[in-house]
Image: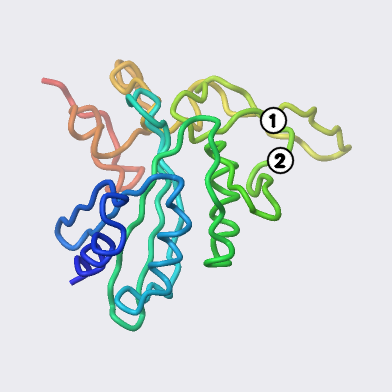
Amino acid sequence: MSKKVLDRLASAFGDRILEATSFRGDDQAVVAPKDWKEIAAFLRDDASCAMDHFLDLTAADYPERDGPRFDVLLFLRSTKLNYRVRLKTRVGDGDSLASLMSVWPGADWGEREIYDMFGVKFEGHPDMRRILLYDEFDGFPLRKDYPIEKTQPLVAYRNVEGIDKLPPFGPDEGQPFSRIDWNARLEGKDLPVSPAISVQVGKRKALSQGSEDVEPVSEE
């Protein structure tokens, strides 16, 4: 039923709706950055949409894409009509996007997190600074080209008597699945890895069996 929202957007904005897709109840409209805030406010205020519930705001990085690098995604719901829709726009590296805080104040921390993790800034945000990381942090860790071997923090550890400081992650620790050469990691090693991958390649039993039961699986 949420497709009615996409139909309403198409009738109101015409070709300013760049794409509209519906798949198994997942309804999405894609708009240009210049139309981002206007169409977001329309979704809230128009009686046929009535998107009064701000759900989430996030981003995704596509560094090899031929076009704007980042997707910014807004998730909305109508508590009155029980519709759900996703609004998406594409933003180039170094470009900014209009803040939605005047439309949904709840966008505050979501926009700050996108800036903190991806480096996308939001024009009109009253407090555009990092929210999870400290000011001295160098780079944006959810960008896919963020160096896996990069050591943070870049500020010196404080020496406090009687308190041991943990060192930063080593080159084989704390790495997301998407940046690991899993075949090399699994080759001849008995390291904890993603259960699905380890079982698939026949190296380990599922970790859900319990640590005492986890043994390398014979390749014979």
Question: Dot 2 lies on which element?
Answer: loop
Horizontal side, residue 173 vs residue 11: left or right: right
Mark found first going from the N terminus, 1 or 2 = 2
Q: Which residue is painted at 38% across and 60% down in the image?
A: 75
Location of residue 93 in the rendering, given as x and y in whole percent from the top left corner: 50, 30
Kind of residue sitting beneath label 2: Tyr
Q: Along the line of sight, which residue is nearer the eye, 184 or 208?
A: 184
**Residue under numbered circle 2:** 134
Location of residue 68 in the rendering, given as x and y in whole percent from the top left corner: 40, 32
CA gap between label 1 and label 2 equals: 9 Å
Between disc 1 and disc 2, the foreground one is: 2
Q: Along the line of sight, which residue is nearer the eye, 171 or 41?
A: 41
- For label 2, count other residues whose C-alpha is less than 10 Å away and answer few (under 14), some (14-19) or many (20+): few
Q: Which residue is painted at 41% across and 56% down in the image?
A: 74
Kind of residue sitting beneath label 1: Pro
Location of residue 141 in the rendering, given as x and y in whole percent from the top left corner: 54, 33
Q: Which residue is painted at 44% across and 45% down in the image?
A: 33
Q: Along the line of sight, which residue is nearer the eye, 28 or 216?
A: 28
Q: Are the two marked residues, 1 and 2, in contact with CB atoms closer than 8 angstroms?
A: yes
- Looking at the rendered structure, which numbered label has been put on residue 139? none
What colour scheme has been applied to the protein in the rendered image? rainbow
Q: Which residue is painted at 25% across and 42% down in the image?
A: 206
- Which image quadrant: the N terminus? bottom left
Quarter residue 194 falls in: top left
**Residue under numbered circle 1:** 153
Horizontal side, residue 19 vs residue 68: left or right: left
- Which image quadrant: the C terminus? top left
